[in-house]
Structure formats: C-alpha cells, structure tokens
Image (spheres, rainbow, N blue to C red):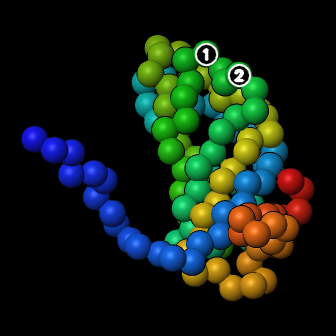
C-alpha cells in the first residue's frame, strides 16, 4: 500500500513566518493533570499557527503539550504534569514560531526574501 501523504487542511500560497522570543514565568501545574496558561505576545492574531520551545531544560516531569492563539496578543501554552506532585514549568525565554496565512505588509517586518522576520509589535527577537 502506498503512503497517501499528509491530509492537507489548507493550501495557502502566501504565508509569513516569524520566530520571536518571549519571557515566560509559568504557574505551578497540579499533579496528574494538564493546565493551559496565558501569556501576552504582542502582534499575534486569532488564526495564526504557533509553536513554542524552551531555550533551556524544562522542569523534570513537565512537558509542553501544545500552544494556540487564544485571542489577539495572547497565546495559551498547555503544560502536562503526569507526576504525583505539583510541578512548576521552568521560567525561561521561549522561542515562539508564528505562521500567518495571507499576511499584509505591516504584519511582519520582513528582513529577507524568505518572507521571515520579526512580528510587528514584538521586536524583542
């Protein structure tokens, strides 16, 4: 059987990508649960795709399960704590990748022909 490939959700010929840094100080996550926590990130918009990564080691027993744009200028990061004790995710400068379909010229401060650059409103990267 051949591999049918990925299920393409949306075909978009025009996209812009930015990777920015964001100082994050999460709250504790209770034992054996997940918790979504909100952080301000100027310039993100509902409909943007976001992905987050820590730049240093995460607290043992804690993982990032996902991220989303909750509202304009706000991202939500979901943390998982499968351990038997409350854990606080590491405070760190996270890297956040933002992908926007059909951007307008003012969305990103584009600095190369690859159409990637800084997210307007957040020039800390």
Please provide percent x and percent y for residue 1: 10, 41
Residue name at image x 66 percent, y 53 percent = 97
- The residue to which callout 1 is attached is 60
Residue identified by numbered label 2? 57
Q: Considering depth in this image, is 39 or 68 the residue closer to the camera?
A: 68
Relative to 95, does residue 117 appear above or below in the rendering?
below
Position of 23 with respect to 89 (left or right) is right
Q: Nearer the viewer, residue 1 or 36?
A: 1
Viewer-side residue, 108 vs 64: 108
Q: Which mark is residue 71?
A: none
Viewer-side residue, 8 vs 70: 8
- For image coordinates 71% across by 65% down, the residue present is 114
Q: Position of residue 6 (x, y in %)?
A: 31, 53
Circles 1, 2 touching at the beta carbon (< 8 Å)? no
* Helix, strand or loop under label 1: loop
Residue 14 percent across, percent down from the top left: 57, 77
Query: What is the quadrant of residue 113 in the picture?
Result: bottom right
Q: Nearer the viewer, mark 1 or mark 2?
A: 2
Please determine whether, in this image, residue 57 is positioned above or below residue 52: above
Above or below, 81 against 99 in this view is: above
């Amino acid at each position: 059987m051949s591999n049918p490939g990925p299920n393409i959700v949306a075909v978009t010929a025009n996209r812009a990508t930015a990777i920015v840094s964001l100082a994050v100080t999460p709250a504790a996550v209770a034992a054996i649960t997940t918790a979504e926590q909100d952080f301000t990130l100027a310039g993100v918009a509902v409909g943007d795709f976001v992905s987050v990564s820590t730049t240093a080691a995460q607290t043992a027993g804690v993982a990032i399960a996902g991220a989303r744009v909750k509202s304009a200028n706000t991202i939500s990061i979901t943390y998982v704590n499968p351990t038997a004790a409350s854990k606080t995710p590491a405070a760190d400068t996270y890297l956040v990748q933002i992908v926007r379909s059909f951007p307008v010229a003012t969305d990103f401060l584009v600095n190369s022909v690859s159409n990637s650059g800084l997210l307007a409103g957040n020039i800390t990267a």
